[in-house]
Image (tube, rainbow, N blue to C red):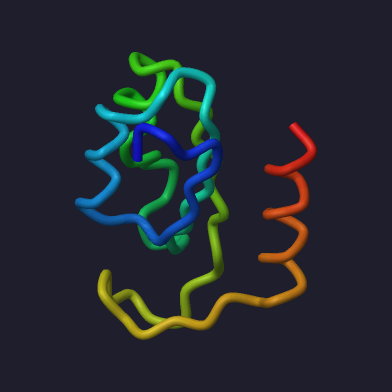
C-alpha cells in the first residue's frame, strides 16, 4: 500500500490501509446508491492526502449487501478519469 500510486477496489474494511498510503496516491472505490451520500473512508483519505474517488452504481434491491454488477463501460471511464488526474 505504501508504494502504490493507484489503488482500486470495492468499498470495505481494507480501505483502512489508506493510513499507510503514500501522500498524493489516488484510489477508486465503488459502492451502491443504497448508501446514499455516505462517502466511506473519505475523511481518512483527506487526512492522509490520498485522493479517493467514488463510483456510485445503481442498486437493484434495498439490501445493503446484494450481489452486484458494475457496468464495464462506466467502470472503464472511471478508471480512465483516475489515471488522467
Above or below residue 66? Residue 85 is: above
Residue occupying the point 69% across, 76% down:
72
| Between 8 and 2, the one nearer to me in the picture | 2
The percent position of residue 46, horizontal first and vertical second, equals: 41, 18
Above or below residue 85? Residue 78 is: below
Q: Locate the C terminus and report the quarter of the image it occupies.
A: top right
Residue occupying the point 77% across, 52% down:
80
Number of residue marks: 0
The percent position of residue 41, horizontal first and vertical second, equals: 32, 36
The percent position of residue 51, horizontal first and vertical second, equals: 53, 28
Q: Locate the N terminus and report the quarter of the image it occupies.
A: top left
Q: Is residue 81 found left or right of 35 in the rendered image? A: right
Q: Which quarter of the figure has residue 6? A: top right
Residue occupying the point 49% across, 35% down:
52
The percent position of residue 30, horizontal first and vertical second, equals: 47, 57
Residue occupying the point 75% across, 45% down:
81
Q: Is residue 73 found left or right of 62 in the rendered image? A: right
Q: Which quarter of the figure has residue 84? A: top right
Above or below residue 73? Residue 21 is: above
Q: Is residue 24 found left or right of 39 in the rendered image? A: right
Q: Is residue 45 found left or right of 17 in the rendered image? A: right
Amino acid at each position: 500500500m505504501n508504494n502504490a500510486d493507484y489503488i482500486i477496489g470495492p468499498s470495505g474494511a481494507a480501505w483502512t490501509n489508506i493510513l499507510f498510503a503514500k501522500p498524493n496516491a489516488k484510489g477508486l472505490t465503488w459502492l451502491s446508491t443504497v448508501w446514499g451520500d455516505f462517502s466511506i473512508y473519505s475523511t481518512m483519505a483527506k487526512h492522509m492526502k490520498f485522493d479517493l474517488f467514488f463510483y456510485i452504481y445503481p442498486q437493484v434491491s434495498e439490501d445493503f449487501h446484494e450481489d452486484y454488477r458494475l457496468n464495464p463501460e462506466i467502470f472503464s471511464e472511471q478508471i480512465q478519469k483516475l489515471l488522467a488526474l
